[in-house]
Image (spheres, coloured by chain):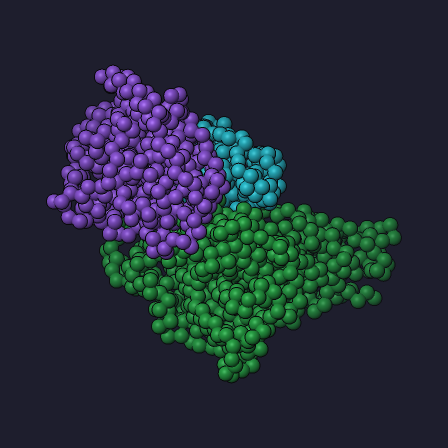
Amino acid sequence: MNAFAGPSMSRRSLLSAGGALVLAFSLSPRLAEAQKTEAKVSGTGKLPGSLSDTPYLDAWIRIGEDDSIAVFTGKAELGQGIKTALIQVAAEQLDVDLKRIVLHTADTGETPNEGYTAASHSMSESGTAIMNAAAQVRAILVARAAEQLGMPATQLTVENGVVSGGGKTLSYGKLVGPDVLHVKARPHSPLKDPKQNTIIGKSVPRVDIPGKLTGAVAYVQDLRLPGMVHARVVRPPVYGAQLTRVDTAKAEGMPGVVKVVRDGNYLAVLAKGEYQAIRAMNALDASASWSGGIALPKKDEIYAVLKGLPSHDTVIQDKGQVGAGRGGTAVKAAYHRPYQLHGSIGPSCAVGHLDGDQLTVWSHTQGAYPDRDAIAEMVGMPQDKVRVIHMEGAGCYGHNGADDAAADAALLATKIPGTPVRVQWMREQEHRWEPYGSAMVVEASATLDGSGKITDWVYDVWSTPHTTRPGPAGSLLAANLIAKPFQAPYPDPIPQPAGGGDRNAVPGYDFPNSRVTKHFIAQMPLRASAMRSLGAYMNVFSLESFMDELALAAKIDPVEFRLQNLTDPRGRDVINLAAEKFGWKDWQRKGPGHGRGFAYARYKNLAVYCAIALEMEVEREAGHVRILRAVAATDSGEAVNPDGIRNQTEGGIVQSASWTLYEEVDYSTQEILSRDWASYPILRFPAVPGAVEVHIVDRPGEPFLGTGEGSQGPTAAAIANSFADATGKRIRDLPLSPEKIRRTLEA
Amino acid sequence: MKVVFGIVAVIVILAAAALGYALSPSAIAAIQPPAPASFQQAEVKHGAELARLGDCNTCHTVKGGAPYAGGYGLETSFGTIYSTNITPDADTGIGRWSEAAFARAMRQGLDREGDHLYPAFPYTHFTKLSDPDVKALYAFFMTRTPVKKAARDNDLPFPLNWRPVLAGWKLLFFHPGRFQPDAKASDQVNHGAYLVQGLGHCGACHTPRNVLQAEKRDDFLEGGEAEGWTAPAIAGNAMPAPKAWTQTALKDYLTGRYAKDHGVAAGPMQPVAQNLSEVPQSDVDAIVAYIHPGMRQGNAQPANAQASAAASGSSGQSGQGAAIYAGLCARCHEQASPSRYSEGLNLADSSALHEASGRNFVNFVLAGVQPPEGRAGPFMPPLAGSLTDGQLTALADYLRQAKAGLKPWDDLKDTISSVRKTALAAEAQPQS
Amino acid sequence: MTKFTVNDKPVSTETAPDTPLLYVLRNELELNGAKFGCGLGQCGACTVLLDGQAIFSCLTPLAAIEGRKVTTLEGLGTIDNPGPVQAAFIEEQAAQCGYCIPGMIMRTQGMLNENPSPSEEEIREHLNTNLCRCGTHMRILRAARRAAGKPPADEAALAERSAT
Ligand code: FES
Ligand code: FES
């Protein structure tokens, strides 16, 4: 009998279910059973990807007797195109047409718990799980067909979900009896030979784009429930301020206002019309007086302040013998990164509805399950009475206001039972209250021997936390503000090899003697959390800037210098490819102010490889940088959707160019001053690069490495390096703003 | 009267032109472009500051184009004059100009070959420059990145496209000579006067011009025009600002910040303020010290909003203008705005509303104010598409009465269409 | 009562005249195309056409809409039959989260209404009012070029720019 034959059915399961479709409804409680895993990066057990946390095949794939095919993922579409890639993976292994697959994304009521959609893990966790589950489901169904047709499975063929042999055909729907798929996955799956792939590896158009571009309901902002009211919150002027007085009467009397909510320092207004809610919010805001609050640090002293705070220090790499009195040229440098905004184009939004004893929240959270747990704790309801359904928002790039808006919606929904409440943050609320990407300090020193070899490498990084996600209720703004507040939990550092502030602090190069120390500062002068690529952005910027400074000191071409210090063949491949496509060897300087730069990193030293070559013109009078061309080479393992990889990489390059050239949260000791796009400028069309090229090294059959966060760090360093090449002056403090450039070049 | 004067002037000009042509000044020998290294760093740095004080970049750079490579079109009532390439490119720039040639251009309005320059290049002001400053400016420009870009021909009718005519114009209106300090005034005030009358050439926009485009010297800084905007009086009795200018407000305004009771620099003044934010603050203080005493008074009558607004229906509280104001403007101009950069002026204090012409008001509404690429700064959205001419008129009528207590501008329709035209023309400006 | 047309259909509303058009489009007419991004005229997420010209619907009050012609994303085409600009954006897969894209599409349409054959500089200048945070700019530019009947590739634009 075929090695991949499905398990024979147990009596219990036959009795327990009345057919495949029922599974969909009967699953949730079982899931709850199967999933005692709390919020954590999942997919770390014996079984492939997230199957290790959620082993039942029917938690991932359900097939109806009507041949409907539903695929479930605990991950969320964040604009990275994950839906399309997951559908491709499932369709490939199931041998069905793409269009037949209905994908359900993160929903605590029906999908597996895959923790957060973050750290570019979606493909490696969910993609791997779905790929293996699909292959096993196919094998089970084919085996059943073999039994029913009395032919060996090897002689059967499958086309678009129909198994045929000996002139007879059976569709998946006919084969999938009760509970057939309610079986645990096996460690090994009969995956297709990658050479046979017809869907994986194709640039399939994104399934979500046509709807989004023609006005379909695509975002939680577009969700309209019957009888829904519009809410606006009023926030304190600064973290920790106390509400001393507020006159709710005026707001309550305004047209359309349904209710004004005050709960300790938590203030909000509910109204029938959205603009009525905004008017009332302004009135409420004007009538509120606050006192106290935490003093913010002086912006121009922030780096000294950070280094002055107590830190938990860990040596995360100690290799060979550092500083064993070797001679040679010593090079030293320090680099700084200010606080930076996620700055989602659509401010956070959520809808909450308390229906009887069931609370449902629609949110663009990156972690439906962990957010559900935090919300349940905040409102004091059992977890199984709270359901968080992911619905897309605007791109978040990490932990922005999403979870806090979800908490607002949940809290306000409990204040007006039976009525759905839509909360939309205002632009300045998103700017002021989202948790920022942490300010950071890096100090690096190295020794070069006569031959240009790096004999000593010492690297220190200081940072406040890079994740303060839910988890506990105290991580939600609303929970900090209500009369019976939950305290923000003490943040934990993310351990190596992934790391948080120290992500990519360990060099990917082979230095014989290297000591890398992370200084974790638990105290947060400004609220901070995960922002796309976490510490990797700053560490790669610093490390790769420093590599160029060393190459210069050693008088070796920067690309050559990197290759000399790198053995990882896949790393060398992307470096060579980027250099070749850019035309590094015979590049000519057009004149003064024209320069080129190179940078490379493997994200987290264990995920996507990315090398970037870039050229720019520096217009020194106004201090403007014009990026003429950026050429990237990436290796994300097996490329499921090449255009998706290109899209995310192009996006990462342009977004990082904006961070690197312009971005810096502005604040006084009293308050956050970056409140809109006029006080927090970002890249606009006239200044975006002239051209961005992305070249992909495909590795069929290799594990998925993710893509979303590979290009930010290399872009930042390539910009700094090409600026140094163009002007002979190096800027080590982000951002390379027009004003800073002008002053640097005039000095 | 004007006309008669005009005719007389033209005759004089042509006569003088012939004369001027007869004995036109000689060329100054071309030189090999000097090596950038041959200039003192300190001198170049000082030159950079002076170039900002003189706003050279504003007229000699096109949007998105190479700095100082010229090509920017300056609209005059006679036609369009295009700025020249003042990078040290040997063939198309000033690379072959000696310091003497450069100095002569700055002070006498003659190019190296000895041809007369159009006074759109404000040598009528630069003539006041000191020797060291001319030297520093020369050092600065000769160390810029050379750009090969030939100057574009001006669009001028005959006889104005015939440069010798300028000899006559100069004879009538050009008064060469260094700056003369006022012995009674402080050094600071004198330095301010030097910057305002000379390098800053404030009068080029803020002083009214006669039919032949010459600044009326007796009405110095009493209000002129600039690229479709009114350059309000900053001296004399015609100042539109209802509230008095404080020194702080003036400095904030001049450096591109929000000035209490006055708002922010916009239109052609915005790049000037950007430049002034990048020069030594002592220079700005000097300018303030010189200008401010002349503009202490707020001149407009306080508005009696209700009374006047009630007066007319369409522009009264109940009218379309009021409704548009409430929906479109009040959010930033009345309520506490979210960001200090989108903070709006209380329009009762607005100079634009108190000016004799609605130009600046219309310019503000249609174009708004946006900070330069990559910089934080005051912001007002462009609203050109949001309002029809009729709606804009209703809004203007309402605000004139309700906020300024003045009667509506009568010629507003033409103003609006001409501003819309200029905006289109600006978009059509040659780029890079 | 304010009367106007949206995508050629007559509309009338009792909503207060100082209410920005955006909220009427989204909540009364249940049109999703125009998005809230800042409410300040700084990002363009809310861009729609008013008498054919691109405007910020988050600012423009009903009082300014009376008797005028509003076109939203939905007015350009449908998912089965997208308009030319929408088709160009789909062709170029010009979206990541896609939240800014409706505004980009409307801004591009507004540009083409005024200037059917824009230069690369003009396209960039025209889109200057609209922000994208995902960094989809390169694809948005390609889509705008395609919609304007120009070669969409970056290289073509580079060539055009260095030629001028
Ligand atoms: S939402 Fe209208 S411009 Fe940002
Ligand atoms: S695609 Fe996400 S903001 Fe533009």
Q: Position of residue A48 (x, y in %)?
A: 66, 67
Q: Is residue A614 visible?
A: yes
Residue found farthest to the left: B184
Task: Please state which of residues B101 and A590 is positioned toward the viewer in this rendering.
Answer: B101
How many numbered discs, if any?
Answer: 0
Figure quadrant of the N terminus of chain B: top left
Instruction: Give coordinates of residue A498: x percent, y percent.
Output: 54, 69
The one of A583 and A302 positioned closer to us in this rendering: A583
- Chain in green colour: A
Check the image and name the residue furthest to the right: A166
Residue A690 in the image: x percent, y percent? 54, 46
Q: Residue at position x 25%, y 44% from top?
A: B195
Comparing A430 with A246, the one in front is: A430
Against A416, residue B412 (above or below) is above
Q: Colour of chain B?
A: purple
- Chain that is coloured cyan in the picture: C
Quadrant assignment, res B174 = top left
On the picture, is A438 further left or further right than B296?
Answer: right
Whether residue A361 is visible to the viewer of this picture, yes or no, is no
**Residue B352: x %, y % from top left:** 26, 34
Q: Residue at x 21, y 33 (%)?
A: B220
Relative to B220, A261 lies left or right: right
Considering only vertical position in the picture, is A226 above or below B321? Answer: below
Residue at the image point whose x is 23% and y is 43% from the top: B194
| Along the line of sight, the residue nearer the viewer: A110 or A543 | A543
Picture quadrant of residue A125: bottom right
Which residue is pictured at 29% across the width and 31% down the height?
Answer: B225
